[in-house]
Image (cartoon, coloured by chain):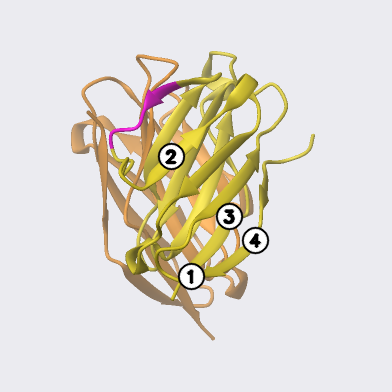
Chain colours: A yellow, B orange
Amino acid sequence: EAGVAQSPRYKIIEKRQSVAFWCNPISGHATLYWYQQILGQGPKLLIQFQNNGVVDDSQLPKDRFSAERLKGVDSTLKIQPAKLEDSAVYLCASRSRRTGSMNTEAFFGQGTRLTVV
Amino acid sequence: AQSVTQLGSHVSVSEGALVLLRCNYSSSVPPYLFWYVQYPNQGLQLLLKYTSAATLVKGINGFEAEFKKSETSFHLTKPSAHMSDAAEYFCAVRGSGSSASKIIFGSGTRLSIRP
Protein backbone atom coordinates (compact mmCIF):
# COMPACT_ATOMS: atom_id res chain seq x y z
CA GLU A 1 0.00 0.00 0.00
CA ALA A 2 1.13 3.55 -0.59
CA GLY A 3 2.65 5.39 2.36
CA VAL A 4 1.92 8.81 3.81
CA ALA A 5 2.59 11.50 1.22
CA GLN A 6 3.71 15.00 2.13
CA SER A 7 4.52 18.05 0.06
CA PRO A 8 6.57 20.05 -0.40
CA ARG A 9 9.75 18.35 0.85
CA TYR A 10 11.53 21.66 1.41
CA LYS A 11 10.37 25.25 1.83
CA ILE A 12 12.26 28.46 2.53
CA ILE A 13 10.29 31.58 3.42
CA GLU A 14 10.93 34.92 5.03
CA LYS A 15 9.59 35.69 8.48
CA ARG A 16 6.06 37.06 8.55
CA GLN A 17 5.21 35.20 5.34
CA SER A 18 2.66 32.40 5.26
CA VAL A 19 3.18 28.76 4.29
CA ALA A 20 1.06 25.64 3.91
CA PHE A 21 1.92 21.96 4.06
CA TRP A 22 -0.12 19.14 2.62
CA CYS A 23 -0.53 15.55 3.78
CA ASN A 24 -2.26 12.56 2.20
CA PRO A 25 -2.50 9.72 4.73
CA ILE A 26 -2.61 6.02 4.03
CA SER A 27 -5.95 5.05 2.56
CA GLY A 28 -8.49 4.15 5.22
CA HIS A 29 -6.52 5.58 8.14
CA ALA A 30 -8.87 7.49 10.40
CA THR A 31 -6.28 9.08 12.67
CA LEU A 32 -3.95 11.77 11.35
CA TYR A 33 -1.20 13.55 13.28
CA TRP A 34 0.92 16.61 12.60
CA TYR A 35 4.23 16.78 14.48
CA GLN A 36 6.85 19.51 14.65
CA GLN A 37 10.46 18.32 14.93
CA ILE A 38 13.02 20.99 15.73
CA LEU A 39 16.62 20.07 14.95
CA GLY A 40 18.05 17.82 17.64
CA GLN A 41 14.71 17.19 19.35
CA GLY A 42 11.99 14.58 19.30
CA PRO A 43 8.76 15.12 17.40
CA LYS A 44 6.22 17.28 19.23
CA LEU A 45 2.55 16.65 18.56
CA LEU A 46 0.81 19.72 17.18
CA ILE A 47 -2.61 18.34 16.34
CA GLN A 48 -4.42 15.02 16.08
CA PHE A 49 -7.49 14.34 13.94
CA GLN A 50 -9.91 11.44 14.16
CA ASN A 51 -11.64 11.42 10.76
CA ASN A 52 -12.33 15.16 10.22
CA GLY A 53 -12.64 16.06 13.91
CA VAL A 54 -9.89 17.46 16.13
CA VAL A 55 -8.99 15.15 19.04
CA ASP A 56 -6.10 17.13 20.50
CA ASP A 57 -4.66 20.51 19.55
CA SER A 58 -3.40 21.53 22.96
CA GLN A 59 0.13 22.26 21.70
CA LEU A 60 -0.84 24.03 18.49
CA PRO A 61 0.05 27.76 18.60
CA LYS A 62 -3.39 28.82 17.48
CA ASP A 63 -2.49 32.48 16.99
CA ARG A 64 -0.42 31.50 13.95
CA PHE A 65 -0.97 27.82 13.19
CA SER A 66 -4.10 26.25 11.76
CA ALA A 67 -4.94 22.84 10.38
CA GLU A 68 -7.87 21.23 8.71
CA ARG A 69 -8.83 17.82 7.45
CA LEU A 70 -11.77 18.25 5.15
CA LYS A 71 -13.71 15.08 4.37
CA GLY A 72 -11.51 13.12 6.76
CA VAL A 73 -8.79 12.37 4.23
CA ASP A 74 -6.15 14.94 3.19
CA SER A 75 -4.94 17.52 5.65
CA THR A 76 -3.34 20.94 5.42
CA LEU A 77 -1.24 22.68 8.07
CA LYS A 78 -0.78 26.43 7.74
CA ILE A 79 1.47 28.93 9.44
CA GLN A 80 0.62 32.62 9.18
CA PRO A 81 2.71 34.62 9.91
CA ALA A 82 5.86 32.54 10.25
CA LYS A 83 8.53 33.24 12.84
CA LEU A 84 12.19 32.26 12.88
CA GLU A 85 11.52 29.69 15.60
CA ASP A 86 9.10 27.85 13.31
CA SER A 87 12.09 26.47 11.38
CA ALA A 88 11.67 22.71 11.77
CA VAL A 89 10.61 19.53 10.01
CA TYR A 90 6.86 19.06 9.94
CA LEU A 91 5.89 15.41 9.98
CA CYS A 92 2.53 13.97 9.11
CA ALA A 93 1.53 10.51 10.31
CA SER A 94 -1.55 8.34 10.11
CA ARG A 95 -2.94 5.32 11.94
CA SER A 96 -5.54 2.73 11.10
CA ARG A 97 -9.12 3.02 12.31
CA ARG A 98 -9.12 -0.64 13.28
CA THR A 99 -8.62 -1.46 16.92
CA GLY A 100 -6.43 -4.21 18.30
CA SER A 101 -2.73 -4.80 18.77
CA MET A 102 -2.05 -5.00 15.04
CA ASN A 103 -3.00 -1.38 14.47
CA THR A 104 -1.38 0.56 17.28
CA GLU A 105 1.44 2.37 15.50
CA ALA A 106 1.57 5.45 13.31
CA PHE A 107 3.09 5.55 9.85
CA PHE A 108 5.08 8.64 8.95
CA GLY A 109 5.66 10.64 5.83
CA GLN A 110 9.10 11.97 4.91
CA GLY A 111 8.31 15.40 6.29
CA THR A 112 8.56 18.97 5.09
CA ARG A 113 11.68 20.87 6.10
CA LEU A 114 10.78 24.52 6.70
CA THR A 115 13.44 27.20 6.96
CA VAL A 116 12.33 30.68 8.03
CA VAL A 117 14.89 33.41 7.30
CA ALA B 1 -0.97 11.20 30.84
CA GLN B 2 1.91 9.52 29.08
CA SER B 3 5.57 10.49 28.71
CA VAL B 4 8.92 8.93 27.87
CA THR B 5 12.47 9.73 28.91
CA GLN B 6 15.43 8.65 26.84
CA LEU B 7 18.67 8.54 28.79
CA GLY B 8 21.63 9.71 26.75
CA SER B 9 21.25 12.00 23.78
CA HIS B 10 24.25 10.41 22.08
CA VAL B 11 25.58 6.86 22.25
CA SER B 12 28.72 5.72 20.45
CA VAL B 13 29.72 2.06 20.09
CA SER B 14 32.24 0.13 18.05
CA GLU B 15 31.14 -1.94 15.10
CA GLY B 16 30.26 -5.41 16.38
CA ALA B 17 29.64 -4.23 19.94
CA LEU B 18 26.40 -4.39 21.90
CA VAL B 19 23.95 -1.55 21.37
CA LEU B 20 21.85 -0.44 24.36
CA LEU B 21 19.53 2.56 24.12
CA ARG B 22 17.55 3.39 27.23
CA CYS B 23 13.91 4.40 27.53
CA ASN B 24 11.73 4.85 30.60
CA TYR B 25 8.04 5.57 30.34
CA SER B 26 5.24 6.98 32.42
CA SER B 27 1.65 6.05 31.74
CA SER B 28 -1.60 6.22 33.66
CA VAL B 29 -2.98 3.28 31.67
CA PRO B 30 -1.37 0.13 30.24
CA PRO B 31 0.85 1.49 27.50
CA TYR B 32 1.68 0.67 23.96
CA LEU B 33 5.40 1.34 23.46
CA PHE B 34 7.36 1.88 20.27
CA TRP B 35 10.86 2.38 18.98
CA TYR B 36 11.26 4.35 15.77
CA VAL B 37 14.43 5.02 13.76
CA GLN B 38 15.11 8.13 11.70
CA TYR B 39 17.79 8.38 9.05
CA PRO B 40 18.95 11.81 7.83
CA ASN B 41 16.29 13.71 5.88
CA GLN B 42 13.81 10.87 6.32
CA GLY B 43 10.62 10.30 8.25
CA LEU B 44 10.31 7.88 11.15
CA GLN B 45 10.31 4.13 10.56
CA LEU B 46 8.92 1.67 13.09
CA LEU B 47 11.53 -0.71 14.50
CA LEU B 48 9.31 -2.61 16.94
CA LYS B 49 6.33 -2.25 19.23
CA TYR B 50 5.04 -3.58 22.55
CA THR B 51 1.32 -4.27 22.74
CA SER B 52 1.19 -6.54 25.82
CA ALA B 53 1.34 -9.78 23.82
CA ALA B 54 4.92 -10.55 24.91
CA THR B 55 7.42 -8.69 27.07
CA LEU B 56 10.37 -9.41 24.75
CA VAL B 57 9.73 -7.88 21.38
CA LYS B 58 11.79 -8.52 18.28
CA GLY B 59 11.94 -5.96 15.52
CA ILE B 60 13.59 -5.30 12.22
CA ASN B 61 17.35 -5.13 11.58
CA GLY B 62 18.16 -7.41 14.54
CA PHE B 63 16.85 -5.05 17.22
CA GLU B 64 14.81 -6.15 20.21
CA ALA B 65 13.38 -4.56 23.34
CA GLU B 66 12.12 -5.85 26.65
CA PHE B 67 9.15 -4.40 28.49
CA LYS B 68 9.78 -4.31 32.25
CA LYS B 69 6.77 -3.05 34.13
CA SER B 70 8.53 -3.03 37.51
CA GLU B 71 11.20 -0.73 36.12
CA THR B 72 8.87 1.16 33.73
CA SER B 73 11.51 0.58 31.07
CA PHE B 74 11.58 -0.42 27.42
CA HIS B 75 15.28 -0.46 26.48
CA LEU B 76 16.36 -1.19 22.92
CA THR B 77 19.22 -3.62 22.27
CA LYS B 78 21.12 -5.18 19.41
CA PRO B 79 23.85 -7.78 20.03
CA SER B 80 26.23 -6.59 17.31
CA ALA B 81 26.25 -3.09 15.87
CA HIS B 82 26.60 -2.48 12.15
CA MET B 83 27.70 0.71 10.46
CA SER B 84 24.26 1.01 8.89
CA ASP B 85 22.69 1.31 12.36
CA ALA B 86 23.96 4.88 12.70
CA ALA B 87 20.80 6.98 13.01
CA GLU B 88 18.52 8.74 15.47
CA TYR B 89 16.32 6.51 17.61
CA PHE B 90 13.09 7.57 19.29
CA CYS B 91 11.09 5.85 21.99
CA ALA B 92 7.36 6.59 22.02
CA VAL B 93 4.31 5.75 24.14
CA ARG B 94 0.57 5.62 23.57
CA GLY B 95 -2.11 4.84 26.09
CA SER B 96 -4.08 1.69 25.29
CA GLY B 97 -7.26 2.87 26.91
CA SER B 98 -8.60 4.83 23.98
CA SER B 99 -8.39 4.41 20.25
CA ALA B 100 -7.82 8.16 20.04
CA SER B 101 -4.81 8.25 22.38
CA LYS B 102 -1.96 10.41 21.19
CA ILE B 103 1.57 9.14 20.58
CA ILE B 104 4.22 10.92 22.63
CA PHE B 105 7.90 10.80 21.68
CA GLY B 106 11.09 11.05 23.67
CA SER B 107 13.86 13.47 22.81
CA GLY B 108 15.83 10.89 20.87
CA THR B 109 19.23 9.18 21.03
CA ARG B 110 21.75 9.57 18.27
CA LEU B 111 23.64 6.33 17.70
CA SER B 112 27.12 6.53 16.20
CA ILE B 113 29.12 3.48 15.14
CA ARG B 114 32.91 3.53 15.26
CA PRO B 115 34.77 1.40 12.68
Name the residue located 43 percent from the left edge and 39 percent from the top edge: A66
Write the start and end of the magenta stretch as one range.
A54-58
Q: Is residue B12 above or below residue A85?
A: below
Q: Residue furthest right?
A: A1
Q: Disc 1: which chain? A: A
Q: Are marks 1 and 2 in contact (CB under 8 Å)?
A: no
Count neighbours of disc 3 (C-alpha within 10 A) and say few if under 14, some if 14 to 19, many if 20 or more: many
The earlier-in-sequence mark between 4 and 3 is 4
In the rendered structure, the answer to whether residue A86 lies left or right of residue A95 reads: left
Q: Are marks 1 and 3 in contact (CB under 8 Å)?
A: no
Kind of residue at disc 4: Arg
- The residue where tag 3 is placed is A111
Q: Are marks 4 and 3 in contact (CB under 8 Å)?
A: yes
Q: Percent position (x, y) of residue B67?
A: 35, 35
Q: Is residue B52 visible?
A: no
Q: Secondary structure at mark 1?
A: strand
Q: Which mark is residue A95?
A: none
Q: Is residue B108 above or below residue B50?
A: below
Q: Disc 4: which chain? A: A
Kind of residue at disc 2: Ser
Q: Are marks 2 and 4 on the same chain?
A: yes
Q: Nearer the viewer, mark 1 or mark 4?
A: 1
Camera-side residue: A47 or A97? A47
Q: Disc 3: which chain? A: A
Q: Secondary structure at mark 3?
A: loop
Q: Percent position (x, y) of residue B39?
A: 57, 64
Name the residue located 59 percent from the left edge and 75 percent from the top edge: B83
